[in-house]
Amino acid sequence: MGAKGQDWDYTRSMALEAEASGFDSVWLPDHVINAHMAKRVPMLENWTVLSAIAALTKRVTLAGHTFNNSLRNPAVMAKMAATFDVMFGGRLIYSLGSAWFREETTSYGLPWDDHDGRVARLREALVIAKRLWTEQEVSFKGAFYEVNNAYLEPKPLQQPHIPIWVPGDSEATRRLVAELADCWLIYSKPPEVIHEWAREMRARSGRDIPIAVSTVSLAGLADADVKKWSVLYAEERKHRFAVPPTPDDVLNENLWGPVEACAERIRAWQKAGVTHLIIQPIPPFEGMRYFAHEIMPAVRK
């Protein structure tokens, strides 16, 4: 939020500055119509843009926030991911989500299921991808997808396979995380909530699964602007969740306030079990710069 659209020049400039500023990764939404503003606002196709950014950068890892399982055949997408990984030096995170934007999916003539059906579809897609990346020949027949004697060469550069990050926190998604995830990607919550979720996931999975938190960053804004953006963000999110967030929820769960308060929250998240932090800066360019120049040095003290 805060940008006029996903313009290529804007996106390219922000990605290049992110790398120069010391960020570890660059993330792009994966939609074919704009899910965050009015649907007629421009939205570039994710894999095309991500590949161009990868060609222009040297160090940052690239990912979708999150890749949209409803838009592509999973075997073809596994091939795309492997090709990307080989071409760009093993710099891909396979952050594949079950999708939430029904209007987008159905308007493009693609199938839409209820929530648990979409998670079941995602599970099959991840099984297919992981097998194609690690096995010589793959046959699979599920409720949603089928491959027959499929080959995928070259294999991804990252071994044993491209890291699989599973996003979401529903019960169906948590079961999938426990089974297949190399990292659990969740929208930010207060540290005490994440601490409990991490404990539950360890008990469920029998292993320590890394946790990535994606947070809205309103750091560095005046109080009036923080309030304005929290209202707009809550409004934009209300069609995504069964229990829509309020502006107070946005402030309670995300990052805002003075530098040291932001640094303390990040440290608290880390103590609660968070291993990776993704920021959604608002406004994008200004928020990214403030985080790089003010928050990152404070956290590293």
Image: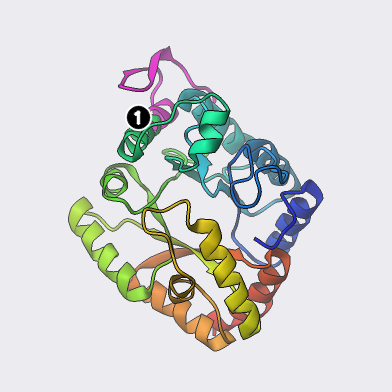
- Residue 127 occupies which quadrant of the picture? top left
Q: Nearer the viewer, residue 183 or 186?
A: 186
Residue 71 appears in the figure: no
For image coordinates 43% across by 30% down, the residue present is 112
User: In the displayed structure, does residue 174 sit left or right of residue 167?
Assistant: left
For image coordinates 38% across by 21% down, the residue present is 145
**From which residue to which does the magenta span run?**
128-154
Query: Which residue carries the number 1 mark?
Result: 124
Q: Is residue 289 above or below residue 43?
A: below
Q: Nearer the viewer, residue 132 or 8?
A: 8
The image's colour scheme reads rainbow
* Amino acid type, residue under disc 1 in the picture: Glu
**x and y, in percent, of residue 85 in the image:** 57, 38
Q: Is residue 299 above or below residue 285?
A: below
**x and y, in percent, of residue 51 in the image:** 68, 39
Farthest residue toward the right?
9
Q: Which type of secondary structure does the marked residue at label 1 adopt?
A: helix
Q: In which quadrant will I find the N terminus?
A: bottom right
| Residue 141 covered by magenta stretch | yes
User: In the displayed structure, does residue 133 sit left or right of residue 142?
Assistant: right
Count neighbours of disc 1 (C-alpha within 10 A) and say few if under 14, some if 14 to 19, many if 20 or more: many
Q: Is residue 215 above or below residue 204?
A: below
How many marks overall? 1
Farthest residue toward the top?
149
For image coordinates 69% across by 60% down, the residue present is 19
| Residue 224 covered by magenta stretch | no
